[in-house]
Image (cartoon, helix red, strand yellow):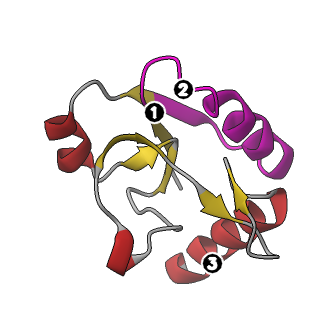
């Protein structure tokens, strides 16, 4: 399983995303800085930060997954807008990917 976080330069939510990932997994996480809208579209970055698990965005919402250099917002379990997924949401995304691989 590969974990990659796509982000824009100086993204204030990169550190919280990496900290939460470190809480839920010991797998290595790579980061990739995206500097243009064209590159964001090529790699499927739906705002910064975007987590890819094996190249797939587990938090993508098909109807609203526009790619670009904007900040990305998530919804927590209570439906509140937050800058990064909760540890529970990240655990669930990792578990779902493990199940898909088995």
Mark whose residue sits in front, 2 or 3: 2
Does 68 sit left or right of 9 as displayed? left
Specify whether residue 26 is in view: no
Mark whose residue sits in front, 1 or 3: 1
Element type at mark 1: strand
Specify whether residue 97 is in view: yes
What segment is highlighted magenta in the picture? 8-31
Residue at coordinates 66% horizontally, 65% vertically from top-left? 94
Does 74 sit left or right of 82 as displayed? left
Is residue 43 inside the magenta stretch? Answer: no
Spatial CA distance of label 1 from label 3 is: 23 Å
Residue 18's tag is none
Residue 63 location, x and y as percent? 34, 80
Q: Quadrant of the C terminus?
A: bottom right
Q: Are marks 1 and 2 in contact (CB under 8 Å)?
A: yes
- The front one of 16 and 74 is 74
Residue at coordinates 61% horizontally, 31% vertically from top-left? 14
Residue 96's tag is 3
Point out the tag, 2 or 3, that comes first from the N-terminus. Answer: 2
- Marks counted in the figure total 3
Classify 10 Å Cα crowding around label 2: few (below 14), some (14-19), many (20 and above).
Answer: some
Q: Quadrant of the rendered structure where residue 55 is?
A: bottom left
Residue 7's tag is 1
Spatial CA distance of label 1 from label 2 is: 6 Å
Classify 10 Å Cα crowding around label 3: few (below 14), some (14-19), many (20 and above).
Answer: few
Q: Are marks 1 and 3 in contact (CB under 8 Å)?
A: no
Identify residue for label 2. Answer: 11
Residue 36 location, x and y as percent? 21, 29
Residue 78 location, x and y as percent? 82, 76
């Amino acid at each position: 399983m590969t974990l990659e976080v796509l982000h824009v330069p100086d993204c204030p939510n990169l550190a919280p995303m990496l900290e939460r990932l470190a809480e839920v997994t010991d797998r290595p996480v790579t980061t990739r800085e995206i500097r243009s809208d064209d590159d964001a579209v090529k790699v499927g970055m739906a705002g910064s930060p975007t987590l890819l698990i094996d190249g797939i965005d587990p938090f993508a919402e098909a109807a609203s997954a526009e790619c670009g250099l904007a900040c990305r917002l998530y919804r927590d379990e209570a439906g509140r807008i937050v800058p990064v997924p909760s540890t529970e949401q990240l655990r669930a995304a990792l578990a779902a990917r493990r199940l898909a691989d088995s």
